Amino acid sequence: MKNKKHILPIIIGILIIAIGTLSYFLYQNMNKTKIANENMYNSNLYELMNYVQNVETYLAKATISSSSTHAAETLTYLWREANLAETYLSNLPVQSQELENTAKFLNQVSDYSYSLSRKNIKGEELSDEDFNNLEELHTYSLSLEDTLNQLAWDLENGSISWKELAQTEKDQFSQAVSSEIDMFSTLEENFHEYSGLIYDGAFSEHMTTSEPKMITGEDVTEEDAKNKVREFMQDKNIQEINTLEQSQNTNIPAYNFSVKTEEKDNYAISVSKKGCYVVYSNCNRDIGEQVWSYEDANKKGQEFLEKVGIKNMQNTYYLNESGILTINYAYNQNGVIIYPDLIKVKVALDNGEILGFESTGYLNNHTERKIEKNIISEEQAKKTLNKNLNIKSANLAIIPTEYKTEILCYEFKGTVENREFIVYINAKTGEEEDILVIYNTPNGVLTM
């Protein structure tokens, strides 16, 4: 009996420890599940934001397109992006009723663009009413984009949680577009169902060839490549050059090096085996206070390219990230901008130091082109443009296609209601080839 009195507390103690341990592991498991779910929801939200931004961009392009063929392509992409946005919207942990207006908006964008693309494919021109509807949809897409950005910010700083969103009777999405949706309910009567669309593909921002035009001849030795590094970094006090694993599974096989300078900076540099060209160079270091302007950095980049023997390069777009300005340079052949021949240069804005260089596009594509002379005039090309485009500049340019070909175009830069666009008109046929939307951000000039 006495032993039983001693055993009972021990058993109770063991049970308490066991229950506590089990509770701890259950809590840990629940916490891991919660974190995994939140990560998944965050991922879905950012995918949704990305596709909504694409919807906004394609709507903007569709509003100024003047070519039935190119408009059909743009509207087809719009249809696809709206569908994908709707898919990621449905994966968020918010009751479907609360998302109904947002889902309806995306669905109507999808259906309407679907209908208009078929209209274009049949050779029919879009009416003024069609363009007005696209303008309205674009306005609402901007509102939705702003709302999603605010939601992401609120989630990031803890102002709201996914749990609270799931319990909220009316979420932020539906508030953003609910008042506008009814205006488009009459459009549904005109929607038609089709079996499917064929994607023709869009123009690539950059073209990589299977056989790089500048990469020819016999392989150089590793020592030749090291000498190229020394030449490329002639203004640096090189302390040592270490050989890394060679790049083989690329269309530009290269020697890779790690370079340490007396200033304690570390550079990664790749030199092509054929031709002995610097393909890539990069240095990561802390950036001090920004004192260099974009103009000064661009001048420094131009001087650097001249110094390493690359001439006639014209700056196009740029992006400032954490005090490092990345500038895109395209080759200029007698006034014609050759966009496939692209080089990127990174300039530190604290002291103007060249921190990065990438010449893949240039090495893949650079050659002296035979520029077509038998082309339409600039004035003839202007007749193809949307009448609402206020032209700011015009230039001849060669742009790449996803089919690894090139097209000579007139490049028209202009605005429609303070929105900046670039329109490319085929200099041979007068057809609209592409439209880009220009985004002037605090960090640089980008295109989509």
Image (cartoon, grey):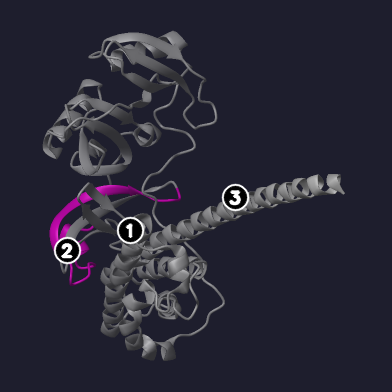
Q: Does label 1 or label 3 sit earlier along the sequence?
A: 3
Residue 173 lies in the magenta-colored region: no
Q: Secondary structure at mark 2?
A: strand
The numbered mark, 2 or 1, whose residue comes first in the sequence reads 1
> What's under tag 1, amino acid-wise?
Trp
Residue 146 sits in which quadrant? bottom left
Q: What segment carries the magenta color?
A: 376-403
Circle 2 crowding by C-alpha within 10 Å: few under 14, some 14–19, many from 20: some
Q: Amino acid at mark 3?
A: Gln
Is 48 rendered above or below residue 444?
A: below
Depth check: give the residue in front, 164 or 412. Answer: 164
Around disc 3, counting alpha carbons within 10 Å, would you say few (fewer than 14), some (14 to 19), or many (20 or more)? few
Q: Residue at x 39, y 28 (%)?
A: 214
Question: Which residue does the numbered mark 1 point to in the structure image?
Answer: 153
Tag 2 residue = 415
Q: Are marks 2 and 3 in contact (CB under 8 Å)?
A: no
Of residues 144 and 175, the one nearer the viewer is 175
Residue farthest right in this picture: 1
Q: Position of residue 280 (x, y in %)?
A: 37, 27
Question: Residues at badges 2 and 1 in contact (C-beta under 8 Å)?
Answer: no
| Residue that numbered label 3 is attached to | 28
Look at the picture and state if 228 lies above or below 350.
Answer: above
Q: Is residue 440 visible from the viewing direction of this image?
A: yes
| Above or below, comparing residue 385 to residue 220 in the picture | below
Instruction: Examine the structure image and report whether residue 380 is included in the region drawn in magenta.
Output: yes
